[in-house]
Structures are given as structure tokens and as C-alpha cells.
Image (cartoon, grey):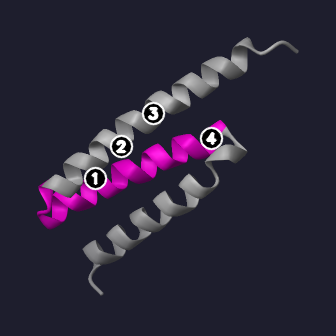
Amino acid sequence: MDSLTLFGLVAVTAMLVTYALEERGAWYTLGFAAACAAGSAYGFLQGAWPFGLVEAVWTIVALRKWRLRMAAKTTEPI
């Protein structure tokens, strides 16, 4: 297994784990966004630009979701 394939495996595994744990807290959503960014980089590096592009969009979606979750958390009554 070459280093690029290992990087892709780690990125996709991180996406799976953080997606599964997202309901436990907003920081898992941020982790999912970071894993999507890594998946996007992997897609572009290996030459599969459609995969890289879709993962880049998922990164933006996850960052927006994280930002909304953090904003909601700060407006909750104590």
C-alpha cells in the first residue's frame, strides 16, 4: 500500500467515525469537516477530481452545520 492510498484510507475512515459520532457533540461535526477536507485532497491528489469536488462541497456543508450548532449552543439558556 503506497502512502497516498494510506492517506485516503485514513481520511475515509475518519469521515465514517466522525459522522457516526456527530450527535455526541459539535466537535465531531468539525472533525467530520476536517476529514471531508482530507478526503477532498485525496481525491484531487489521486486524479479523481469529481470525488475531490464532492468532498470539498461536503466540507463546506459540514462547516456550516458546525457553525450553526455552535451558534445554537451559545444562545441556549443556562
Vertical order, 4 against 28 (above or below): below
- Secondary structure found at label 1: helix
Kind of residue at badge 2: Trp
- Secondary structure found at label 3: helix
Region in magenta? 26-49
Earlier in the chain: of badge 2 and badge 4, it is: 4
**Label 4 near label 3: C-beta < 8 Å?**
no
Q: Dot 2 corresponds to which residue?
A: 58
Earlier in the chain: of badge 1 and badge 2, it is: 1
- Residue 71, disc: none
Q: Residue at x 60, y 46 (%)?
A: 28
**Label 1 near label 3: C-beta < 8 Å?**
no
**Label 2 near label 1: C-beta < 8 Å?**
yes
- Secondary structure found at label 2: helix
> How many angstroms separate mark 1 from mark 2 (CA)?
9 Å
- Residue 27, disc: 4
- Residue 63, disc: 3
Q: Residue at x 28, y 52 (%)?
A: 40
> How many angstroms separate mark 3 from mark 4 (CA)?
11 Å
Secondary structure mostly seen in the magenta stretch: helix
